[in-house]
């Protein structure tokens, strides 16, 4: 092993630690590794820059826009709702339709975008049948994963691998290249998810489906107080008052004289005689009466009907509790309620946070959100799906107010389908170019507004992919891929290609449980191609072994789709192991059986 290979392997080990520990956001870690490779001379600067112009980036970025067009016009929700109506009162048929529809949609639309729309529908429908959402959410999320592996655009990992093949002299994937080997996994996997998986999940877990007034009883009451003469709050702005800094009390509303209740702002001045609507636990509300010179006026449960009105004629009983899920792309991620002005800018009052089964009620002003957190919030004014979408939050109940550009629904569908058809059938127009033209067309027709373009594209994912592509390129240039393939050749019999295929599927599947599937694929693909070259095996057979293996992330919530249902389903790691391990074994054997048949080694 020469010095260059040794240096690269040290950098690779460092990269794997960064990805596993998530000391920094993944895109920052990947960019740091890419810079280290350039500084050490392993990767030429121009080669690193070429990764940022890779065809895969344009395709993935364009698909973000096309998928957003389907969401903004309500296409996915309309499809799901129409299919559910077919099920009628049959619980099993409704569950079957949800599985099939999610798997099929996820083959062409980002599975995270699909799940964002489907989760509140699943929660609502499962409860309407008297069933626990736990028994629906995880199988449906897994259906989206195995559905996505069936096409080029179903998962970004397939797109990345396809984009890397050119540098090794191999033909990129067509739209349905992976379908040839993946469809048996889809068929058998769906049968397992329908007939077996729901019965491996217990009916309910501790803390699931508990009434809010019990689960979050520290914030179960709102009370109205009159500001008395001589109160230390009088003639002070809310932001300057000690009351606003009390982490255990929330100022929900303020009214003056016979005026209507209004949402308090930091600059709002409190006067003698004002009525403050405060929220907190009973003990704390009793304490603040004397402390702040307030007089108790009225006490009600948070969900009680109060006859006074908010601006616009809405009843104060519109201040309802909602549960929302923080996604990976959320603006709240790694920030506190104060930093995002959650209350003043968006009129959202944070009552509690549930993280991996643990509920936090106190000192929420300084609580830093993470992806997967479930927030219990109270809306201080009516909010529709656009605000939640902007914040990167998924409501776990269907909203009463929804706003979609339904008049442009057929435009969105037509542009999406035409982009795929042209990119798949016209030889002179690659799929990435067709989708890029489609993305521009969605803006021209107003399906996506110009100012929304920068919001719907997940730039951090594009930065991560571009940076991680540099790592894969450096693996080949440094000679590390050849070195590692020679090491593997000592232990794998060259005269048994099927064993090599099985080994790469297994290694990839194991690594993807611990690291992102994109990083796993980029690291192992150069190794697989180098091994194929050294052993005389058809390189496409090992390419497909890595491709399918990278999508078999069923055992941990590291897969973004599984993280999305982790909180709402109140799952634990044992649930993922029980359901995912069987599916992993099924998928492994089917992949090992199908790959040698289609791509003879």
Image: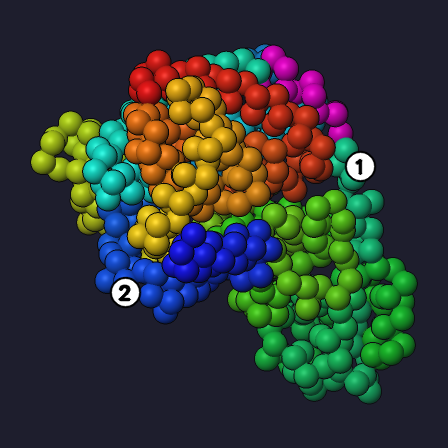
Residue 526 image-quadrant placement: top left
Q: Position of residue 449 (x, y in %)?
A: 29, 53
Which residue occupies 80% across, 36% down? 206
Mark number displayed over residue 45: 2
Report if residue 198 lies within the magenta region: yes
Q: Secondary structure at mark 1?
A: loop
Mark number displayed over residue 591: none
Q: Count all numbered tags in the image, as a single digit.
A: 2
- Whether residue 176 is visible to the viewer of this picture, yes or no, is yes
Discs 2/1, front: 2
Return the residue nearer the eye: 407 or 512: 512
Range of residues picked out in magenta: 193-204
Mark number displayed over residue 206: 1
Residue 377 falls left or right of residue 171: right
Report if residue 5 lies within the magenta region: no
Return the residue nearer the eye: 484 or 502: 484
Disc 2 from disc 1: Cα separation: 53 Å
Which residue occupies 41% across, 39% down? 486
In the displayed structure, would residue 188 be above or below residue 142? Answer: above
Which residue occupies 70% across, 21% down? 200
Residue 250 falls left or right of residue 487: right
């Amino acid at each position: 092993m020469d010095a260059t290979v040794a240096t690269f392997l040290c950098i690779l080990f460092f990269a794997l630690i960064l990805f596993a520990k998530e000391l920094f956001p993944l895109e920052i870690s990947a960019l740091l590794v890419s810079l280290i490779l350039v500084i050490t001379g392993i990767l030429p600067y121009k080669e690193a820059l070429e990764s940022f112009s890779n065809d895969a980036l344009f395709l993935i970025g364009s698909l973000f826009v096309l998928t957003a067009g389907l969401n903004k016009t309500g296409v996915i929700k309309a499809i799901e709702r129409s299919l559910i109506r077919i099920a009628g009162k049959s619980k099993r048929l409704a569950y079957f339709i949800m599985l099939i529809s999610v798997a099929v949609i996820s083959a062409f639309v980002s599975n995270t975008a699909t799940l964002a729309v489907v989760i509140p529908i699943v929660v609502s429908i499962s409860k309407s049948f008297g069933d626990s959402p736990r028994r629906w959410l995880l199988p449906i999320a897994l259906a989206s994963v195995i559905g996505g592996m069936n096409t080029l655009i179903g998962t970004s990992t397939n797109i990345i691998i396809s984009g890397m093949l050119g540098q090794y002299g191999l033909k990129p994937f067509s739209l349905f290249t992976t379908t040839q080997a993946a469809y048996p996994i889809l068929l058998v996997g769906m049968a397992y998810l329908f007939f077996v998986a729901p019965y491996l999940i217990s009916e309910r877990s501790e803390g699931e489906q508990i009434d809010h007034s019990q689960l979050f009883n520290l914030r179960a009451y709102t009370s109205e107080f009159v500001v008395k003469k001589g109160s230390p709050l009088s003639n002070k702005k809310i932001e300057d008052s000690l009351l606003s800094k009390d982490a255990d009390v929330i100022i929900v509303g303020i009214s003056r004289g016979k005026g209507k209740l209004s949402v308090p702002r930091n600059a709002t001045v409190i006067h003698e005689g004002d009525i403050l609507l405060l929220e907190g636990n009973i003990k704390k509300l009793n304490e603040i009466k004397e402390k702040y010179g307030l007089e108790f006026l009225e006490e009600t449960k948070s969900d009680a009907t109060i006859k006074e009105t908010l601006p616009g004629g809405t009843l104060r009983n519109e201040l309802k509790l909602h549960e929302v899920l923080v996604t990976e792309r959320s603006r709240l991620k790694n920030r506190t309620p104060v930093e995002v002005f959650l209350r003043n800018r968006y009129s959202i009052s944070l009552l509690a946070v549930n993280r991996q089964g643990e509920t936090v009620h106190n000192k929420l002003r300084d609580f830093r959100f993470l992806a997967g957190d479930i927030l219990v919030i109270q809306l201080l004014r009516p909010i529709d799906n656009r605000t939640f979408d902007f914040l990167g939050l998924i409501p776990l109940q269907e909203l009463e107010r929804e706003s979609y550009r339904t008049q442009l629904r057929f435009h969105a569908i037509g542009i999406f389908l035409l982009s795929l058809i042209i990119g798949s059938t016209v030889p002179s127009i690659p799929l990435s170019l067709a989708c890029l033209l489609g993305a521009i067309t969605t803006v021209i027709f107003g399906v996506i507004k110009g100012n929304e373009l920068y919001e719907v594209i997940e730039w951090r994912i594009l930065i991560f992919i571009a940076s991680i592509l540099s790592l894969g390129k450096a693996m080949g240039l440094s000679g590390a891929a050849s070195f590692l393939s020679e090491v593997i050749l000592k232990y794998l019999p060259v005269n048994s290609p099927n064993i090599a295929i099985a080994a790469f599927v297994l290694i990839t599947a194991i690594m993807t449980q611990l690291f992102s599937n994109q990083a796993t694929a980029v690291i192992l693909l150069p190794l697989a191609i180098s091994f194929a070259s050294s052993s005389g095996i058809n390189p496409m057979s090992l390419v497909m072994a890595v491709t399918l293996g990278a999508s078999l992330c069923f055992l941990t919530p590291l897969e973004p789709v599984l993280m999305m249902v982790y909180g709402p389903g109140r799952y634990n790691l044992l649930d993922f192991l029980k359901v995912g391990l069987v599916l992993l074994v099924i998928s492994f054997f089917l992949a090992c059986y199908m790959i040698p048949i289609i791509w003879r080694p």
